[in-house]
């Protein structure tokens, strides 16, 4: 190990207050979130100002950090709104964010003026591909830069040696890959008028494409050999759980997971697995090596588009794309999270239908997984029911085992 081999931060996404709490409880060191405006996930539920303040306070209670995204490419009409937004965050006092994630130099300057106590991190949207870019942002006052996904591990290692020791490197290690360089995509805006660089991406890269010759309208020709057409821009998901030692030794300070639009089950699965992998490595590298197959097995239980190592070891090739479909692999369905106990029954909000007699699994923040069967169920009025068919239905159930708040119920598909 070199001098930079310190335990990295595990940075987990949250799209709402529920997933923020899940990330905190299931092992995140820090959580990144977005408000209703100025982040790049306009389709996510995102946080109202009230929920944001509540969530930050919750995370701080557990000693965790929260970063707020403000990484749009701002236009003139955005400037005064951004300034007012930062003033609102400043007014949070002790519950203000620990950092802002910014891509636009103008937004960066406004943040320095309006919320000076908060760290500024430079988003991957800013195309951060070399050490001089890191030095540039460091001179301006940034404490961290998120590397472009297009950097190799070798480039990251060199970068680490050529920037100030206190300058932090944040790197995506898990989640969806973007077809566009550093996420700066024009496809969505071109096809639908919804600008990916203002947070309204329609994920046009996941669509199915054919070629149409001008003089033969209506005749669709496949771009690849697949006769059903092709999803030519559809990348597999990034997963670096099997390369934790290499990432740590490179000097990366923060391991970032993509997925602010994902469920609490996804957040819990990824957070607790990477948490265990990192902790096992620092306990004893041999323990990590012995458990590597188990980490991968658990990660595959979350929704995914199969896995790739992206640009870390080489440029992605044909095998890193999925040409014949754009659907997720889904091994488990999220049923709900335990929120309390009433008269011996466990309270939860139904996320997907399940019934008495179903075989389910309970995943716990400490890494344990319990297999059990649903024994009994009541609705919010105390009436016994056989199933809960309505989304967001409040139910009370006996799962045949002792449970705790924040335990998550899932069912194998």
Image (tube, helix red, strand yellow):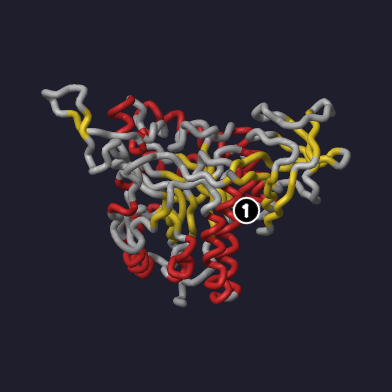
Query: 382 or 264: which is nearer to us?
Result: 382
- Where residue 407 appears, as percent x and y from the top left, is 71, 48
**Any part of residue 54 in sight:** yes
- The residue at 45%/66% (across/down) is 243
Q: Quadrant of residue 47?
A: top right
- Image-based side of 95 in relation to 175, left or right: right
**Any part of residue 139 in sight:** no
- Image-based side of 316 in relation to 404, left or right: left
Q: How many marks?
A: 1
Q: Quadrant of residue 325?
A: top left
Query: 194 or 319: which is nearer to us?
Result: 319
- The residue at 45%/56% (across/down) is 239
- Where residue 110 appears, as percent x and y from the top left, is 43, 39
Residue position marked by numbered label 1 in the rendering: 64
Label 1, residues with CA under 10 Å away: few <14, some 14-19, many ≥20 = some
Q: Find numbered disc 1 in the image and state the secondary structure of the residue it sits on.
A: loop
- Image-based side of 325 in relation to 395, left or right: left
- The residue at 39%/49% (across/down) is 236
- Where residue 263 appears, as percent x and y from the top left, is 57, 41
Q: Residue furthest right?
A: 343
- Image-based side of 256 in relation to 224, left or right: right
- Where residue 391 appears, as percent x and y from the top left, is 65, 29
Query: 397 or 139: which is nearer to us?
Result: 397
Give the position of the C terminus as an image quadrant: top right
Relative to 408, residue 51 above or below = above
Relative to 296, residue 187 above or below = above
- The residue at 46%/32% (across/down) is 42
């Amino acid at each position: 190990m070199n001098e930079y081999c310190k335990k990295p931060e595990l940075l987990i996404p949250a799209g709402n207050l529920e997933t923020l709490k899940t990330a905190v409880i299931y092992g995140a060191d820090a959580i990144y979130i977005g408000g209703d405006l100025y982040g790049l996930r306009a389709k996510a539920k995102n946080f109202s100002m009230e929920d944001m303040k509540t969530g930050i306070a919750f995370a701080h209670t557990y000693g965790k950090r929260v970063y707020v995204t403000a990484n749009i490419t701002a236009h003139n009409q955005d400037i005064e709104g951004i300034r007012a937004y930062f003033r609102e965050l400043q007014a949070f006092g002790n519950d203000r964010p620990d950092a802002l994630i910014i891509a636009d130099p103008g937004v960066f300057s406004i943040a320095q003026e309006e919320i000076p106590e908060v760290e500024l991190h430079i988003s991957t949207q800013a195309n951060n591909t070399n050490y001089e870019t890191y030095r540039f942002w460091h001179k301006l006052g940034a404490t961290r830069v998120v590397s472009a996904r297009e950097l190799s591990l070798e480039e990251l290692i060199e970068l680490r040696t050529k920037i100030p020791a206190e300058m932090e490197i944040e790197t995506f290690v898990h989640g969806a890959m973007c077809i566009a360089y550093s996420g700066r995509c024009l496809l969505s805006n071109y096809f639908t008028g919804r600008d990916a660089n203002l947070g309204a991406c329609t994920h046009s890269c996941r669509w199915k494409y054919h070629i149409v010759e001008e003089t033969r309208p209506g005749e669709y020709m496949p771009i690849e050999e697949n006769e059903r057409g092709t999803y030519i821009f559809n990348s597999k998901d990034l997963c670096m759980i099997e390369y934790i030692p290499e990432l740590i030794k490179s000097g990366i300070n923060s391991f970032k997971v993509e997925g602010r639009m994902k469920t609490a089950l996804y957040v819990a699965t990824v957070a607790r697995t990477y948490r265990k992998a990192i902790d096992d490595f620092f306990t004893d590298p041999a323990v990590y090596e012995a458990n590597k197959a188990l980490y991968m097995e658990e990660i595959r239980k979350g929704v995914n588009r199969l896995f790739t190592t992206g640009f870390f070891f080489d440029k992605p090739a044909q095998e890193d794309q999925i040409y014949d479909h754009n659907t997720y692999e889904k091994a488990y369905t999220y049923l709900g999270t335990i929120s309390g106990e009433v008269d011996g029954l466990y309270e939860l909000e139904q996320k997907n239908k399940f019934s008495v007699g179903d075989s389910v699994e309970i995943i716990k923040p400490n890494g344990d997984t319990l297999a059990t069967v649903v024994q009994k169920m009541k609705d919010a009025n105390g009436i016994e029911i056989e199933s809960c068919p309505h989304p967001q239905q409040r139910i009370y159930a006996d799962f045949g085992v002792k449970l705790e708040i924040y335990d998550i119920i899932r069912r194998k598909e």
